[in-house]
Image (cartoon, helix red, strand yellow):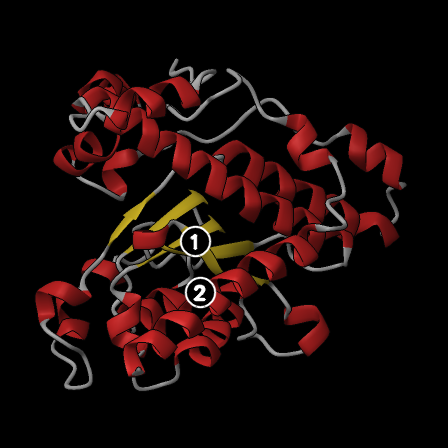
């Protein structure tokens, strides 16, 4: 198992200009984990507000900043298209304006607890997103490999509205906090059924906390991409279809069983500080 108890030590050793390949992969893995944690907290928040626990955050990669977030709002909005990704895309639209949107998105990485559906995967492609990182598979509607491979699909690349074909295709990396994402969905289905004949506590007793489907890496990325992302030391997980981001060697129960009431406030603050830096920058550029 990959352990990352001392991420600061690995990043401080990188202060010498040369950062070893192995260190780079550990730092990247740690970043994936930390960013996805925010998305998981937000998904838990969605669960506590009677929504499907699917949530995302958008990262501006060059500045390592949270710039937008989204949570599922299909219950409250009564529309089937109010997916987490669209909420975040709207925020970014407001941030940079419609004209710079595609240029801006080439530096943006999405972290989403559940694989984007076919609709969202297509929207993200048309916006020219850099990369998607997700937790668990979307078994019924997944558009990043599970059902369709929209992010690599050639037909969509030929659409006249899209930029250069090569740049529009994006990698979608699965498996970050995957079991946590699955557990949140299981909690949701237990709550959904609480009005059913089975009493809730009985349903919760039946909640499966032990078994998880395999993670078939090759459904989503090739071996080369896997090694680029996580390093060759981890490649055994690629062959074994097993999880690698098990930072605690187990599910992070406290992460998914805590109601993160302040998470929206917290994310708003993060987004606002990026917004302010952007405004200052554009002011300087116009002087
Ligand atoms: Zn969607």
Question: Residue at the spot x=18%, y=67% of the render?
Answer: 168
The image shows residue 186, relative to residue 236, as above or below, that is below
Asked if residue 56 lies left or right of residue 260, the reply is: left
Q: Is residue 155 left or right of residue 100?
A: left
**Image location (x, y in percent) of residue 252:** 60, 26
Outermost residue toward the front in this view: 287
What mark, if any, has residue 233 been given in the picture? Answer: none
Residue at (69, 28) in percent of width and height: 254
| Residue 69 can be seen in this image | no
* Quarter the C terminus occupies: bottom left
Element type at marker 2? Answer: helix
Decide which of tag 1 and tag 2 comes sooner along the chain: 1
Residue shown at 42% from the left, 23% from the top: 8
Percent from the top left, x then y, of residue 188?
70, 48
Mark 1 to mark 2 CA distance (whole Å): 11 Å
Q: Nearer the viewer, residue 12 or 152?
A: 12
Residue 195 place in picture, x, y as percent: 87, 53
Image quadrant of residue 89?
bottom left
Given residues 274 and 249, the one toward you in this image is 274
Q: CB atoms at circles 1 and 2 under 8 Å apart?
A: yes
State the quadrant of the N terminus. Answer: top left
**Residue 2 horizontal side relative to residue 68, left or right:** left
Q: Is residue 255 visible?
A: yes
- The residue singled out by tag 2 in the image is 277
Give residue 71's quadrant in the image: bottom right
Residue at figure coordinates x 29%, y 19% from the top left = 13
Against 78, is 205 above or below?
Answer: above
Per the rendering, the mark at residue 65 is 1
């Amino acid at each position: 198992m990959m352990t990352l108890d001392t991420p600061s030590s690995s990043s401080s050793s990188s202060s010498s200009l040369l950062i070893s390949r192995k260190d780079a992969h550990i730092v990247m893995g740690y970043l994936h984990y930390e960013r996805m944690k925010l998305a998981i907290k937000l998904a838990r928040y969605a669960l506590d507000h009677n929504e499907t626990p699917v949530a995302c955050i958008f990262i501006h990669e060059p500045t390592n900043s949270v710039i937008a977030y989204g949570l599922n709002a299909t219950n409250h909005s009564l529309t089937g298209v109010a997916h987490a990704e669209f909420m975040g895309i709207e925020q970014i639209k407001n941030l940079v304006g419609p004209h710079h949107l595609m240029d801006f998105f080439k530096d943006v990485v999405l972290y989403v607890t559940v694989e984007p559906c076919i609709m969202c995967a297509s929207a993200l492609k048309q916006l020219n997103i850099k990369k998607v990182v997700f937790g668990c598979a979307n078994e019924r509607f997944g558009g990043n490999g599970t059902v369709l491979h929209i992010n690599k699909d050639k037909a969509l690349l030929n659409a006249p509205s899209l930029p250069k074909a090569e740049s529009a295709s994006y990698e979608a990396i699965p498996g970050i906090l995957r079991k946590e994402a699955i557990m949140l969905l299981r909690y949701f289905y237990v709550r959904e059924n609480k009005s059913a004949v089975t009493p809730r506590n009985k349903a919760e007793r039946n909640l499966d906390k032990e078994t998880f489907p395999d993670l078939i890496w090759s459904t989503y990325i090739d071996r080369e991409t896997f090694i680029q992302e996580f390093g060759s030391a981890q490649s055994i997980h690629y062959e074994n279809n097993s999880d690698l981001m098990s930072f605690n060697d187990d599910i992070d129960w406290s992460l998914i069983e805590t109601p993160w009431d302040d998470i929206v406030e917290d994310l708003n603050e993060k987004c606002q500080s990026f917004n302010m830096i952007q405004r200052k920058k554009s002011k300087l550029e116009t002087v």
